Amino acid sequence: MTESIERPAKDPLLQPAGLRGVAADLSSDQRAFKNVSWGKAMMWIFLLSDTFIFGCFLLAYMSARMSTTVPWPNPSEVFALTIRGTEVPLILIAIMTFVLISSSGTMAMAVNFGYRRDRRKTAALMWATAALGATFVGMQAFEWTKLITEGVRPWGNPWGAAQFGSSFFMITGFHGTHVSIGVIFLLVIARKVWRGDFDQGRRGFFTSRKGNYEIVEIMGLYWHFVDLVWVFIFAFFYLW
């Protein structure tokens, strides 16, 4: 005849100490991640990974600039535009920055009206954001064309250190690609908002749940991230 052995119940108040305690606390919390949608969580993970990539690019740029023995080109001279016979330093970059920062404002308003289920204003503001983003990309293409015409290449330039060209084209090109992709997605989502796909629950890309405008907020997260990255590029590349 076997005897049953009663094991003492674990005290729920007793938690492991140190990092194990932090992990146990987070894993036992039923509210920390329950209300976060899959799409929003994936966008945050993507933005986190993209932060590391841009961070590595900027660190590589700073390392190349501080380690080179050849004088680094003066941004005020390289990025100057001649207007009526006078060279105006960084005027194009200032306009590009103003345009992109303004697009963050229109995107924030689009998210606000999306929460209110005002599809017409939401779509109009997303179109305005896409127009500002396309304007930024167009001015960046003009900037690239100007520098290439003046002799800037990834392997050299007429103003000084050869690393300038490769750093410039790599960092601004990678950021411009992000802006271009964002413009395309803004146009796609804005068209769906305008047609009322979210209100009708019409089956399709990001529109399978009726009345859900969350994709507008997710698009806003991406767009604000792109604008924030440009602030760092502007500070490190054009002002330093």
Image (tube, rainbow, N blue to C red):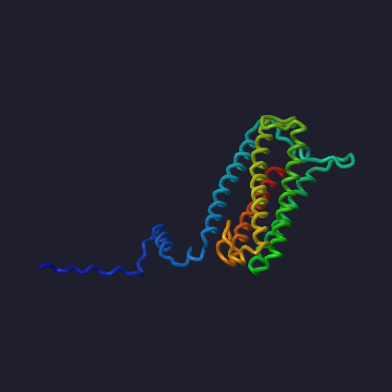
Residue occupying image coordinates x 67% and y 32%: 154
Report which quarter residue 169 is drawn in: top right
Residue occupying image coordinates x 55% and y 64%: 209
Where residue 93 appears, x then y in whole percent? 76, 46
- Vertical comparison of 159 with 76: above or below: above
Where residue 67 appears, x then y in whole percent? 62, 34
- Vertical comparison of 30 with 168: above or below: below
Where residue 22 appears, x then y in whole percent? 42, 60
**Nearer the observer, 34 or 198:** 198
Q: Position of 2 compared to 66: left or right? A: left
Residue occupying image coordinates x 75% and y 49%: 135
Q: How many numbered marks appear?
A: 0
**Nearer the observer, 118 or 11:** 118
Locate the C terminus by quadrant: top right
Where residue 218 appears, x then y in whole percent? 60, 58
Locate the N terminus by quadrant: bottom left
Report which quarter residue 111 is drawn in: bottom right
Q: Residue furthest right?
A: 84
Q: Position of 76 compared to 38: left or right? A: right
Q: Position of 173 compared to 206: left or right? A: right
- Vertical comparison of 96 with 67: above or below: below
